[in-house]
Amino acid sequence: MSAASRILVTRPGEGGERLAQALSEAGFTPARPALMHLQPLGVDEVKRAPLLDVDQYDVVVVTSPFAAECLVEWLDRYWPQLPQGPRFYALGVATAATLYRGLDVKASVPDPGRGTTSEALLAMRSLARLDGQRVLVVGGMGGRQLLAKTLETRGARATKLALYQRVYTAPDATAANWLATGDFTAMTVTSGELLEHLVIWCGQAALNKPLIVSSQRLATLADTMGFASLHVAQGATPEALVTAVQEVGDT
């Protein structure tokens, strides 16, 4: 790939900003089509009982940096001092860092070699048996059900708490043209729901361009949609995705 290669960054929010910065520092030209943004749920939309009773949970699992940001804001309202009871888990280091900054808690994260997926978290030994333990899974509306369901099969009493929603939008004229004509070098995607949304605007040329995804699950989904050049990064961190983009350029 040339230094001016256009790499589409579909991830919204700060995660997308960090990836775009990392790509730029690596010599690529990141472009961010606005296809989705994350919106905190309002006071009337959030189930407050789990927040008020967070001290009653044995485990709190936080699924994304934005979920962590929202959780910090909510707990600040109700808990001047965070209770010591729950053990915190995070899907990745960025989520764990947000929890540490906002709540001064050290969250356990999956082995970096396993990536930042639900499957990686579920592979942790400390979550293998949860007989009778109360687990709070904090994330956004919708999304995968794997975490809560699997933890329940391991004996947990799991509660899902949605603190934000994903708002999908149509691309602007420039981004729509990129997707229709394949006028980019590669594209990065870290969400199945977002992939299902953006494929609507992808022409055949775009389907043939390299698609870098953050897990094998996403690669399998993309294959069913007709994407022909799939590359799986070692997780959803900026470092893993940039490495995958560089490897595509070396092939």
Image (tube, grey):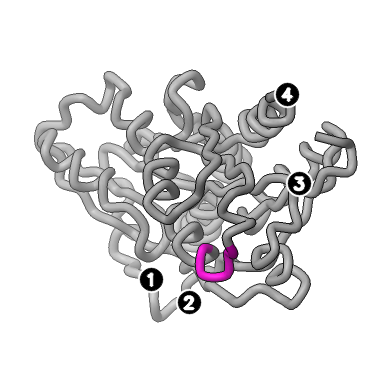
| As drawn, 171 above or below 11 | below
Rounded to the nearest whole Å, what is the CA distance between mark 1 and mark 4?
47 Å
Dot placed on the residue nearer the N-terminal end, 1 or 4: 1
> Which one is in front, 107 or 238?
238
The reply to whether the C-beta atoms of the residues labelled 2 and 1 are less than 8 Å apart is yes
Which residue is depicted at the point 31% across and 46% down? 55
The residue carrying mark 1 is 46
Q: Residue furthest front?
A: 204
- Snapshot quadrant of residue 173: bottom right
Q: Dividing the image into 4 quarters, which one contains the C terminus?
A: top right
Q: Which residue is mark 3?
A: 20
Tell me which label, 1 or 3, sits earlier in the chain: 3
Q: Nearer the viewer, residue 216 or 191?
A: 216
CA gap between label 1 and label 3 equals 31 Å
The residue segment tinted magenta is 199-203
Q: Position of residue 96 (x, y in %)?
A: 53, 35
Q: Position of residue 1 (x, y in %)?
A: 80, 34
